[in-house]
Amino acid sequence: MTITHLVTHSGGFHADELLSSVILTRLYPEATVVRSRDAAWITPGEGRIIYDVGRAYDAEAGIFDHHQRPNPLRESGQPYSSFGLIWKHFGHAYLRALDVPEQDIDHLHAGFDEGFVLPIDLADNGAIEPSAAGPFSGLTLPALLESLKPAFDVRGADAEDRAFAEALAVAGTFVEAAIRGRAAKRRAEAMVLEAISAAGASRVLELPSGMPFRAAVESAGADHMLFVIHPRDNDWALTTIRKGSDTFEARADLPAAWAGLTDAALEEASGVEGAAFCHNARFIAVARTRDAVLKLAELAVAEAGQEMSAH
C-alpha cells in the first residue's frame, strides 16, 4: 500500500509526535503531513498512517495512539507514547533507510529504544517527573523541542504548523545524530576488542585512531587496563579510562607532576622528549610521536602502580 498521508493532531506539539514524524517522513518522503483533529482525517483509511491521535492502537489499520484506555504498554509494563509505537513498528525500516548494516539493526533498534525512545515515552505519559533531570530539566530533548512552539501571542492560522515543520528538521537532526553515534560505537567495538586481544596483559591499550572504547573495555573484562593511546592528526594522545558511564573518576590519573604543563615544561617534568601537553585535570596528555607517548604511558602506569600499592 502506498502511504500518501501522515496524520497527527493539530495544535501545540510535543516531542513524541514530532519524533514519530521524523521516522515516518524519512520512510515516506512523498507523503503529506496532515495536522488535524477532524474525524474525517483521524479515522483509519487507505494510504494513511495516524499517530498520537485517534484513541486507538491498531498497527494493521495504521493507527498508533496511546491516549485511550487501556493504554498500550511494553512487556515491562511501561507505557508507550506514539513515538514508542512508531519506533516498534517502523524503527527497523528506518535504520535500513539510514544504511545501518543489517547485522547491526536488531542491536541498534533495541539500544535506541531503551536509551532514546523510552525516556520520551515515560516523559510524555507523566511516568517520570521533569525534575528527575535536576538542573538540566529545561535542557532535556522534550523541553528543547517544545521550546520551538510559537509564542502565545504569535498569531496566524498556520503559525503552529509552520513551527512544527521547522521543529521537525531540528528533531530529525537529533535522531539521525543519535543513530549515527550508536552505529559508530558498534563499529568501534569490534576494533577495540581486537586491540584488547593484541595488547594481552599490557596496562596500555593502543588504538588505530580516536574512538569510543570504554564500553568495549568493560564488556571484554579488561579490568587491568589503565590507559589508552592513539594517533590524532599530527600527534599522539594518552587518555585515562573512566570507571563508568556515570562518573568522571578514572581507573588511574596521569601523574600529578604533569598537570597543566606544556612543551619544555612537560618534557622536563616527565623526562620525555616530545611530550607536548597534559590537561590540568590529568585525563589526557599529548606527545608529538608514538615513541614519546609510549614513554609517557609507561611512566603513568608505573606511578599508578605505586599509588595502588600504597593503598
Image: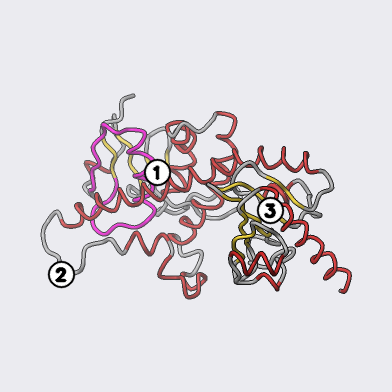
Q: Earlier in the sequence, mark 1 or mark 3?
A: 1
Location of mark 1 (residue): 64
Location of mark 3 (residue): 292
**Label 2: few (<14), some or many (≥20) within 10 Å?**
few
Q: Which residues are magenta?
A: 8-35
Give the x, y percent position of residue 68.
Answer: 41, 53
Give the x, y percent position of residue 190.
Answer: 66, 37
Q: Nearer the viewer, residue 240 or 168?
A: 240
**Residue flagged by tag 1: what amino acid is it?**
Phe
Location of mark 2 (residue): 153
Q: Residue at x 56, y 48 (%)?
A: 232
- Kindly report the distance in space between the C-alpha atoms of the residues bearing marks 1 and 3: 59 Å
Q: Earlier in the sequence, mark 3 or mark 2?
A: 2
Q: Residue at x 33, y 49 (%)?
A: 53
- Mark in front: 3 vs 2: 3
Q: Considering the image in quadrants, where does the N terminus appear?
A: top left
**Residue flagged by tag 2: what amino acid is it?**
Asp
Q: Residue at x 64, y 59 (%)?
A: 275
| SS type, badge 3 | helix
